[in-house]
Image (cartoon, grey):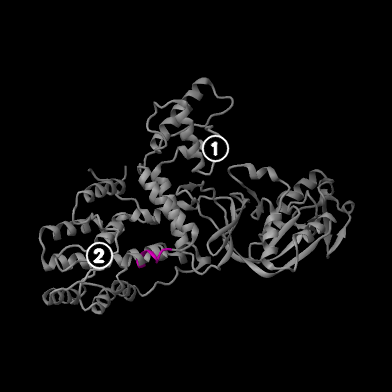
Amino acid sequence: MSFQNILYILLCFSLASCSSVVSDNASEKVIETLEFSSNLKASLKGYIAQPNSESPQIKKVYDMNKFAPFWVNERMELSNVGVEFSNILFKSMHYGLDTMRYDVIELRDKINGLDEIKSDISAIELDVLLTVQYFKFSNDISRGIVDTSLYHPEFGNRKPSKDLSEYLYASHKEGNIIEKLLDLEPQKDEYKKLQAGLALFLTNHTLVDSSLKVHAYKKKSSDADSIRTYKEAKEALVLHDYIVSNQVDDSVFLKGLQAFQINHGLKPDMKVGKNTAKALSGNPFEFYKRAAVSLEKWKWVDDWKDEYILANIATYKLKFYKDENLMQEHKVVVGTIGNKTPELDSEIEYMVAYPFWTVPKSIRNGELVPKSKKDSTYLSRNNYQLLKGGKVVEMSSVYWKNISNDNFDYTVRQRGGRSNALGLIKFYFKNKHSVYFHDTPSKGKFLNDIRAYSHGCVRVDEPMKLAEYLLARDGEIFQIDSVQATIDKRQRKTFTLKNNMPVYIRYITAEGDEEGNIRFYPDIYRKEKELEEIMFPIAEEIEV
């Protein structure tokens, strides 16, 4: 177990017996009348004024408060709001943040020290330390901790910070410091559900960071291999806190396995297949970090529209939101590891019924030309056309044996129809990657757990429901019946929206559900490790 995990457990244990921190009234919003002595205020002013002692931000907020403490009361005790905020810091992992960022060892010691010796200097040092951590924690829950200009340059810098000195002072005067602090968190529905799910996950799971290798069951597995998989899966479910012992009967084991599969975005078939075995071979601390990274990404979101589509690559879902209410959801298929779907912001401008598919050069050269050189009828059999100068060229005029990628100067286009790679409808939004949402003839892919099969575009299940939603939102200009009639007539037609629909494509590997659980999804593009290392730097192991 890592130093961070051990420390977290020890801190929780020590706080449970620390009467100055844990209070029955800690959750109540109590407004205390603080009448501090002039000596304490003078001492605090002198402490703050020391050269190189505190930041301008600290000096500003205490000057605004006339050098009265924020977290300590006139009896030289941690106030109710001080208790609440201290407990938030000790449980900062609930917000996807490393507890060690907030000097919790020093904080615990100063709380205990004030409890033992109620002196001006003890009170001042504790109060200033909590204010320093307030500024750090406020920034972390509102903006995240990663420099997005380096990690994710296309989405720019971290969103600007509030003037936290003024924010703390105003909320202190109003008597709602904790409520206003938590208002700094992202207000997106996805973030709120994930944060609540992470708090529950930490309650129900021990953050073990050692793993057990689980081998997948295969149809041709020997009896010995099957028994091994069964035992490994049981041990892993104990590690993940889904069953209490590896001695439970089969019905309990299967129920636990099914719950694990549901919470990891897998088909709940109660079989230890390849994807289930891979997930079981992880450990709770790894999954905790995955959720923390997902929360971090939501903190980067700034000014999204009130109504939008979120396509999450990692969860294979497309969702409509209006005023942070989930209106509609679709399964999607996304790009392979070699043809990743990009993250982007855009707006759907129009839909095309019965579309052509103009084949990208990379697919044309990498797949279609080699197939046509082996079989000159391949293109015509699969409903493709060749064009030059915008005009259709007869396939028979092409001598494929002499063709190479260097001299192949034709545009390849697939005619509209049910066999078309775009299916019967596509949804266009501007982006430099030339990707879009579209239908697909390969409906069976939507039944799979891992749905990364496309060349980068996003294939949408039930695309006509997507079209219907967009048209209904747009008013009476077009009806879904008009789109269907066009398709039935095998006619290509563009339906331009009066009101463009904002689209946000993201890669976020954990999400919360309505029941307070977290759903973890495989890091198919292997993008999360770098962020995990930034957010949770490896601490040196020490003897405990």
Point 20% across, 76% down: residue: 67
Residue visible at 29% across and 72% down? 172
Q: Where residue 55 appears, x then y in whole percent? A: 26, 73
Residue 450 is covered by the magenta coloring: no
Is residue 459 shown left or right of residue 93?
Answer: right
Residue range (magenta): 180-185
Report the quarter where the C terminus lies: top left
- Counting residues from the N terminus, which is met first, the one under dot 1 or under dot 2? 2
Q: Which residue is mark 1?
A: 268
As helix, strand or loop, the secondary structure at mark 1 comes to: loop
x%, y% of residue 442? 71, 45
Q: Which mark is residue 130?
A: 2
* 237 sits to left or right of 47: right
Q: Is residue 26 left or right of residue 162?
A: left
* SS of the residue under disc 2: helix
Pick the front one: 108 or 212: 108
Residue type, mark 2 in image: Leu
Q: Is residue 332 left or right of residue 208?
A: right
x and y, in percent, of residue 489 in the image: 85, 56
Q: Where does residue 244 sit, x and y in percent of width and height?
A: 37, 33
Dot 1, how many residues are within 10 Å of its Cα: few (below 14), some (14-19), or many (20+)?
A: some
Depicted 212 relative to depicted 84: above or below: above
Is residue 340 visible from the viewing direction of this image? yes
Where the N terminus falls, by quadrant?
top left
Few, some or many C-alpha atoms within 10 Å of disc 2 (few <14, some 14-19, many ≥20)? many
Residue drawn at the location 73% of the way across and 68% of the way down = 476
Q: Quadrant of residue 109?
A: bottom left
Decide whether residue 182 is among the magenta residues: yes
Instruction: Identify the disc placed on residue 241.
Output: none
Front one among 223 and 408:
223
Task: Report, in whole angstroms, how far the alpha carbon at label 1 lies from the one at label 2.
Answer: 46 Å
